[in-house]
Image (cartoon, rainbow, N blue to C red):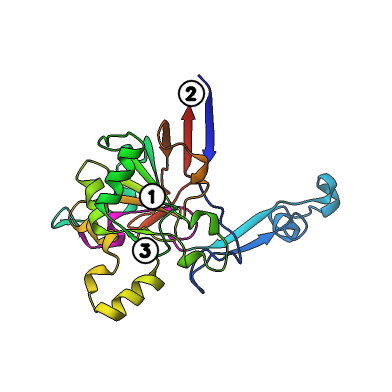
Amino acid sequence: MVRRLVDISAPLQNDVAADPPGFGPQIEYTDHQQSLPQILSFFPGLRKEDLPDGQGWAVERVQLSTHNGTHLDAPWHYHPTMNEGERAWTIDEVPLEWCFQRGVKLDFRHFADGYVATAADVEAELKRIAHTLQPLDIVVVNTSAGAAYGEPDYLARGCGMGAEATLYLLERGVRLTGTDGWSWDAPFVHTAKRYAQTHDASIIWEGHKAGRHIGYCHLEKLHNLEALPSTGFRVSCFPMKIERASAGWTRAVAIIEA
């Protein structure tokens, strides 16, 4: 058996259009020379010349939101409750069993930016790839946003998963999903236009809010989904254990065995 690992995580970077203005990460880099005052202060009498090649260490200081980079959203992010009234889980309470399961990819790259996918769309794609959902399958959605990651229009790209499509998955036992878009829902710029016309608040964050009825997690800002087959792989996406948090960063990896 040959095992191939596919990195489906996006890196944390400064100055990349992957979050709204003011919401991105801030990474401060210290190189081997800049760090010398730090290391010398630990050892009185130590001189730069005493160190191999006169070099210290490299270190970074990072200021992040739990929703920067590829991350796993917990039910707490969507609403205070899940499963029709239970307190919603935070990221440190998400079952680890959810985070290492068989993967399924839905290819929705053909849908227009801002389109809200329906249950019928999910059903048709599952029929096309000849897959029957099983409990705890991890379902990832490849949208047109994936190819636009880091581009100025990334936040406006890709389709979203509506409440109907999300509940279709959850009712069949799926508890962890993912997208290469900025959000599981349709990009806000498109939803805002629809809301301006209809003033129907139920369309706002409708895929996320499905978690009120059935608790679930989803991955956002996945990467490289076009490299995956429709089935025949597993996903590993264990989140950082941050107490009482709404999300946690993850190095999501697809494991293909053939």
The CA distance from mark 3 to mark 1 is: 13 Å
Instruction: Name the residue located 71 percent from the left edge and 51 percent from the top edge.
Output: 57
Mark 1 sits on what residue?
178
Residue 238 shows up from this direction: yes
Mark 2 sits on what residue?
258
Determine whether, in the image, residue 4 is placed left or right of residue 90: right
* Kind of residue at badge 3: Ala
User: Residue 84 falls in which quadrant of the image?
Assistant: bottom left
Residue 216 shows up from this direction: no
Name the spot of residue 206 as percent of width and height, x first. 26, 63
Q: Residues within 10 Å of mark 1 (few under 14, many from 20)?
A: many
Q: Residues within 10 Å of mark 2 (few under 14, many from 20)?
A: few
Report helix, strand or loop for mark 1: strand
Determine whether, in the image, residue 71 is placed left or right of residue 56: left
Disc assigned to residue 186: 3
> What is the magenta range?
65-81
Q: Nearer the viewer, residue 252 or 34?
A: 252
Of the residues under marks 1 and 2, which one precedes in the sequence? 1
Name the spot of residue 96 as percent of width and height, x first. 33, 40
